[in-house]
Image (cartoon, rainbow, N blue to C red):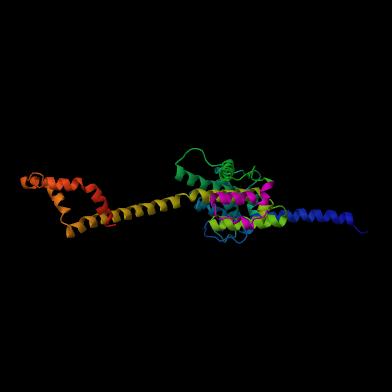
Amino acid sequence: RNGLSTDTRQVTLTQTSSRDEVILCREERAFRMWINSLGIATYVNNVFEDVRNGWVLLEVLDKVCPGYVNWKLATKPPIKMPFRKLENCNQVINIAKDLKFSMVNLAGNDIVQGNKKLIVALLWQLMRFNILQLLNKLRFHSQGSQGKEITDADILSWANNKVKVSGRNSRMESFKDKNLSSGIFFLELLSAVEPRVVNWKVVSKGVNDDEKKLNATYIISVARKLGCSVFLLPEDIIDVNQKMILTLTASIMYWSLQKPQQPETSEQSESSYAASDAASDIASEDSASIIAPSEGEEVNSLPDRASNMPTDDTSTSEAPAADTSTSEAPADDTSTSEAPA
């Protein structure tokens, strides 16, 4: 009569279904922010609805991989005929296969019908491809290396090496490591990238859920303060969402690789300007030191003239006096050289 057993079963079912919906909502928000950050012509309000005609995905593909989209075969919205939507989505699937994406059980009709899980799987591969593409371009530009491309394992090893070099003991075993929920590793990674950016007085140990949420919120704020592109929520860090953890680590890596170029060039330019200013100051001081004695003291000018005219007999007769003065000059020169200063 009280129905306790049936109520518990219903509660567990509703909890699992609502949790899947919550995860999909978080991922939809992250992908929506990422798509709008690309600067495409169409603004996305709801990924699962705006993607169904295939046009937004074609715009994203054209931004990520220019030249792949055949716009002559694409139909721009508003699209009234359903088969035109299917043509756009089929072209998306063909381009994704050319990029060697995993397209198992994913067809153009799934996008038209709005299959959320399959749409998220496609968008995740696009987002990951874009992040790795940016890292490869930046590395090739800075180091000039060719051949091997950056992989997920490279991002993982980079993060661990950064934390280890800074003197910390934290380590990330994988992007789904449950120890990442405390947030300590990412705070240490941000501190390793920029030492003064983390205020450790406000960092907690991350033992309970409240402390984990505080640390996760602080991680996102610090990363955005540095200029990293962050699309995840604090709950993604607490729940250790593998996809979002990878994007966070990659964005920090991208900012870190981009950082040394600008400060070094600015410091070099400032040092070159400082060196040129110092050289001009030294030259002006030397010219002033040469001009000043010529106006007031004739004694220092006589040896210069005598040295410039070694062939005159009259000057050679006066040379011993000049030589004796110059032989005694070292002690006097130091004093006279210090006198103007």
Q: Residue furthest top?
A: 147
Quadrant of the image for the C terminus?
A: bottom left
Q: Please report the bounds of the magenta region as a residue range.
A: 178-204
| Location of residue 176 in the rendering, given as x and y in whole percent from the top left corner | 66, 45
Image height check: is 99 above or below 11?
A: above
Taking the spot 74% from the left edge, 56% from the top edge, the residue there is: 18
Q: Nearer the viewer, residue 223 or 56?
A: 223
Q: Position of residue 68 (x, y in %)?
A: 50, 48
Q: Is residue 129 left or right of residue 310?
A: right
Q: Is residue 193 within the magenta segment?
A: yes
What residue is at 92 percent from the left and 59 percent from the top? 2
Magenta segment, prevailing SS (helix, strand or loop): helix
Q: Is residue 26 left or right of residue 228?
A: right
Residue at far right of view: 1
Residue 247 in view, yes or no: no
Q: Residue 129, percent across and down?
A: 56, 47
171 and 314: which one is in front? 314
Residue 160 or residue 166, whichever sits in front: 166
Q: Residue furthest left?
A: 313
How far from the left and from the top, in percent, is residue 281?
30, 56
How many numbered discs? 0
* Magenta span includes 322: no
Residue 324 showing in the rendered view? yes
**Residue for point 57% across, 51% down:** 191
Q: Which quadrant holds the N terminus?
A: bottom right
Front-most of residues 89 and 306: 306
In the image, what residue occupies the spot 72% across and 55% down? 209
